[in-house]
Amino acid sequence: NVVRLERQYLRKNDTAWVYEDGKLSIRSLDIAFMDAEHVYVRQGLESGDRVVTTSLARISEGAALRLSEGEQ
């Protein structure tokens, strides 16, 4: 079982940024396969995780995040 992630959301060092309880969680990913458009993640993401799709100027584990309107 894998989770498919758009390749543009794969971050440096095979990580993904995830919104978790109002904070940024930087997840290390175990990638099973990559194509031109998607990354197929074996471990590090689960179905239903909220991947941060906005580029952030400063990133740090646990940084406060807010959802855009209508995303609750």
Image (cartoon, helix red, strand yellow):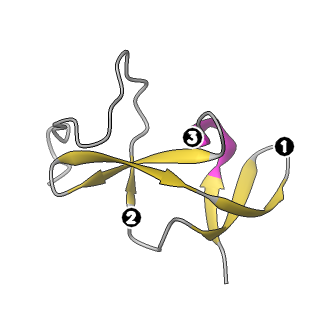
- Residue at 15% from the left image edge and 49% from the top image edge: 22
Q: Is residue 54 left or right of residue 10?
A: left
Report the Cα–Cα distance between label 2 and label 1: 22 Å
Identified by mark 3, the residue type is Tyr
Question: Which residue appears at 36% of the width and 27% of the height?
Answer: 59
Q: What residue did someone put label 3 on? A: 9
Q: Nearer the viewer, residue 52 or 58?
A: 58
Q: Which residue lies furthest to the top in this view?
A: 57
Instruction: State the image coordinates of residue 43 (x, y, percent, origin top left).
Output: 60, 71
> Which amino acid lies under the numbered mark 2 shown in the image of this protein?
Asp
Looking at the rendering, in which quadrant would you find the N terminus?
Answer: bottom right
Give left or right: position of 41 versus 72.
right
**Which is nearer the N-term, disc 2 or disc 1?**
1
The numbered mark at residue 49 is 2
Left or right side of 34 for 28? left
Please report the bounds of the magenta region as a residue range.
Answer: 6-10
Residue beneath label 1, please? Answer: 36
How far apart marks 2 and 3 lie (CA) works out to 13 Å
Q: Relative to residue 31, is residue 43 drawn left or right?
A: left
Q: Taking 21 as reference, is 23 above or below it?
A: above
- Which residue sits at x=57%, y=40%? 9
**Mark 1 and mark 3: Cα distance apart in space:** 13 Å
Kindly check if marks 1 and 3 are in contact, taking CB atoms under 8 A apart as contact: no
Magenta segment, principal secondary structure? Answer: helix
How many badges with numbers are in the image?
3
Q: Where is residue 26 in the image (x, y as percent from the top left)?
A: 42, 47
